[in-house]
Image (spheres, rainbow, N blue to C red):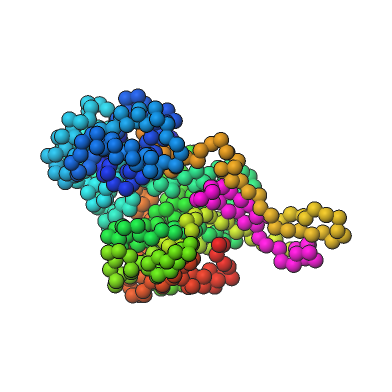
Amino acid sequence: MKNIDCPLASEIVIFGALGDLSRRKLLPSLYQLELAGLLSDDTRIIGVARNKMTLDEFTKLIEESLNEFIKEALDAETVKKFLAKLLYQELDFKDIKAYSHLAKTLTSAQAARVYYFSTPPAIYGDISQGLQSAKLINDADRVVMEKPIGNCLETSKVINDQVSRYFKEQQIYRIDHYLGKETVLNLLVLRFANTLFTNNWDRNCIDHVQITVAESVGIEGRWGFYDEAGQMRDMVQNHLLQVLSLLAMEPPAELSADSVRDEKLKVIKALKPITRQNVKDKTVRGQYADGYLNGVAVPGYLNEEGANENSSTETFVAIKAEIDNWRWAGVPFYLRTGKRMPQKHSEIVVHFKQQAHNIFSESYADLPSNKLTIRLQPDEGVELDMMNKIPGIASQMQIHENKLDLSFSQAYDNQRVVDAYERLLLEVIKGDQSLFVRRDEVEAAWVWADSIIEAWQSTNEEPKPYPAGSWGPVSSIALIARDDRQWVE
């Protein structure tokens, strides 16, 4: 819930403004906010980077980025107005004295600012110290921290401690862009605004849940970063656990930031630990090998440009997660995420329990269970698999499985599906933390993830190879097949 004493930010400062995230997501999202009339006339956007560059060169580069990364036709008048808001500041992030130059670029100390750290997390503390030394932090300012915040619980605490010396917790916005997706936000509405699901959302009615986040791309030139992180740190510890916590949380007392985040935290803390004793039964880690994607040969992870041929970093993870509380006891949550899979595809599938008694056995011997599928990307939407009578006058009743399909693009054909970063940037500008991750959530997630990573390391088991263009290692099929279930593909 927005703090009524929190003014709208009038200056947005992007550290790492020339990086891929800034050019691909942040600045195009700010353009969309301008197009929607959601940026005030006095808003200024200051790009900060190490490169020596004139304002004209920076403006031209951002205009090229808008043309490259925005699918819709640009509005010429809006582009002109948006580009006029831009400023550029060359800055060595680790040079504390250099922040005095940034102070001259910004307005008075009374301005409400958003500082967006689109840089390696290792220098978040340096930037915060530099801003403080130049007297560029006041109580109305906000700071956005991109993930991953550290690579384990210990390093996460170090980074958070460094930033917390200069910013209060209510000023810190830890971003996970999955929390800005329309279909992820719709989980709250689906669960708590529909009696059909509210009253059937527990171990009595649900058999199991599958969460899949598949990427068709490889590491896209990010070898240095990715080989240190791997799929567990890059995707599971944040994106998948955030989706899981929204799926499994208890109803919050209200839609305030802390009410929602309190309930999410309880879910993460209730996850059963995965340790050396059970890691082989509960997890599968894989690494993509040479293969084919859409008929085109693609290299394996160890054959990517700049690769370390001896790397044992995982590019695929499958996990059987279990929540140790009254609502979900005995209901497994199967998590699966990987790179170089057949297609870019993210979805949640909730499998309800089968009917206890089948009165239609003459026409349908084995009634399938109902499935609720929540498509996160692409083609955002919700569908429900259910049984229905086939129209006809035959003496024997014929039934068939059908889908009730709510596709966002069709149901709301006059509404553009908002990019996650657009929504999240707007919430930061407004001063609303509801869609951002609190420090204790991050740390609880690291406790669970660290246990799995440490178990992998202690067993010295290499990741299982899988061909690029497949759905992962064969052992990931066995992980779910042991419970007499199968992945939805």
Instruction: Say whether residue 335 is left or right of residue 26.
Output: right
* Residue 176 image point, x, y percent: 39, 48
* Residue 159 image point, x, y percent: 26, 50
Q: Give the quarter of the figure containing the C terminus.
A: bottom right
Residue reaching furthest to the top:
41
Residue under the image location 41 percent in, 72 percent down? 465
* Residue 407 image point, x, y percent: 59, 46
Q: In which image quadrant can residue 145 be found? A: top left
Q: Is residue 128 above or below residue 322?
A: above
Residue reaching furthest to the left:
97
Can I make out residue 449 in this image?
no
Nearest the eye: 331 or 408 = 408
Does the magenta run of residues contain 380? yes
Q: Is residue 340 above or below residue 200?
A: below
Instruction: Say whether residue 134 is left or right of residue 265.
Output: left
Q: Give the quarter of the figure containing the N terminus.
A: top left
The residue stretch that appears in magenta: 358-386
Nearest the eye: 131 or 230 = 230
Number of marks present in the image shown: 0
Q: Is residue 409 above or below residue 403?
A: above
* Residue 186 image point, x, y percent: 53, 44
Nearest the eye: 353 or 467 = 467
Residue reaching furthest to the front:
296
Can I make out residue 400 in this image?
yes
Does the magenta run of residues contain 441? no
Residue under the image location 54 percent in, 51 percent down? 375
Q: Is residue 105 above or below residue 339?
A: above
Residue under the image location 52 percent in, 54 percent down? 347
Residue under the image location 30 percent in, 64 percent down? 305
